[in-house]
Image: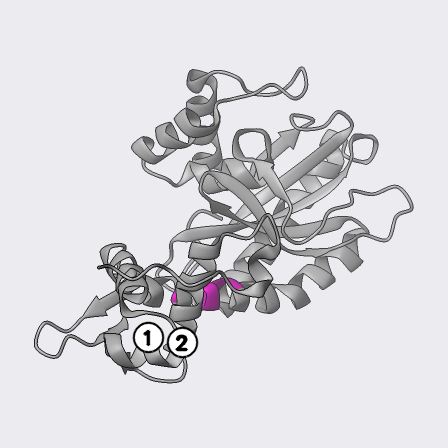
Amino acid sequence: MMPTDPPAPASTKDPYLLASLHRGLEVLDCFAARDSWGLADLAAHLGQNKATIFRVLHTLEQFGYLAKDAATGRYSLGLRLHALGAAAVRNEQLRWQALPPLQDLAESTGETVHVGILHDGIVVTVQIVEGTHAVRMHSTVGKRSPAHASALGKVLMAYLPDAEVDAVVTAHGLPRFTANTITTPEALRERLHRVRLDGYAQDEEEIEAGLRCVAAPITDHAGRPTAALAISAPASRMDPARVAALIPQVKATALRISRMLGSPSMAAA
C-alpha cells in the first residue's frame, strides 16, 4: 500500500502557501549542502516518506531542475537551475554596475533614471536613481510596466525576432493607457523598426499622461541588447529641444554600462 503524504509543515498554515511547492523547494535547498542525493538518503534527511520525495524528485527532473544519474540513481542539480543562476548573477551584476553611471546621469540632468529588463514580455525595473526635482517620476525596483507603452519596453522588443514580438503581443495584448498608446501590431512593428534605426526609443505620454521617457539599449558581453536605460521626466520639462539634448547623454550612459558589462561594442547606439 502506498504510504500517504505526511502533514504539511506548520508554516504551510498560511492559506496562500502551497504545501507541494514548499516541499519541492525544501528538496532543492538540500543540494546546497551536498552535490548529489539518493532517494533514501534524501527522504531520511527531510523526514519524509520515499514515495513523497520520489514524486518531488521526478517532477523536478522532468522540468530540468534536477538530473538523475542512470547508473547510480542519484540526483544532482540540472541545467535549468544553472541557467537560472547565471541569469540571476547577470541581473545582479547589471544592477550594481549600472548604479554609478545612473547616479552620474541623474545628477547631471536632475531627472530620474532607471534600468529595466524584459521578463515574460513585461518590463521589470532592476535599478533606479531618482532625480533631484521636486516634481519627478517616482518608481521602485521590481516595478512592472507594459512593454509596448514604455520606452524601455520598445527598446527591449526592438531587437527581438519578429516571432518573439508577436508572442509578447499575443500574451499581453496592446491595451490603451492614454490617447498616445500604440494599440495595433502594425504600428508597433513600425515603431520598433524606427527604434532600431535610431538606437533609442521614446515614451511620448503613452503609459501615463504628462510623463515622457527616452531609453537606449544596454548590451551584454556578446554585444546583445539585454537591458535598457531610460530617463523619465514630466512632459513640461521634455520639450523637443530638451529631448534632443538628453538623447546623446542617455545613449552614452547606456554605452558606458555596456562596456562595464564586457560588451565589445554598442552598434545600436
Label 2 near label 1: C-beta < 8 Å? yes
Asked if residue 229 shows in the view, the reply is yes
Tell me residue 247's x, y (percent): 63, 43
Residue 245 or residue 195, whichever sits in front: 195
Q: Secondary structure at mark 1?
A: helix
User: Would residue 116 appear left or right of 31 to someone viewing this image?
Assistant: right
Determine which residue is flagged by label 1. Answer: 43
Mark 1–mark 2 Cα distance, whole angstroms, equals 5 Å
Tell me residue 80's x, y (percent): 30, 61
Determine which residue is flagged by label 2. Answer: 46
Residue 87 lies in the magenta stretch: yes
Q: Furthest-left residue in view?
A: 71
Q: Is residue 67 above or below residue 170?
A: below
Residue 194 or residue 63, whichever sits in front: 63
Q: Residues within 10 Å of mark 1 (few under 14, many from 20)?
A: some
Q: Is residue 135 above or below residue 175?
A: below
Magenta span: predominant SS is helix
Q: Furthest-right residue in view?
A: 134
Residue 255 or residue 30, whichever sits in front: 30
Q: Which residue appears at 20% of the width and 77% of the height?
A: 74
Q: Furthest-front residue in view?
A: 1
Tell me residue 45's x, y (percent): 38, 81
Amino acid on which the number 1 mark rests in the picture: Ala
Q: Residues within 10 Å of mark 2 (few under 14, many from 20)?
A: few
Residue 153 lies in the magenta stretch: no
Tell me residue 1's x, y (percent): 22, 59
Tag shown at residue 269 = none
Residue 99 or residue 79, whichever sits in front: 79
Q: Which residue appears at 73% of the width and 47% of the height?
A: 139
The residue stretch that appears in magenta: 86-91
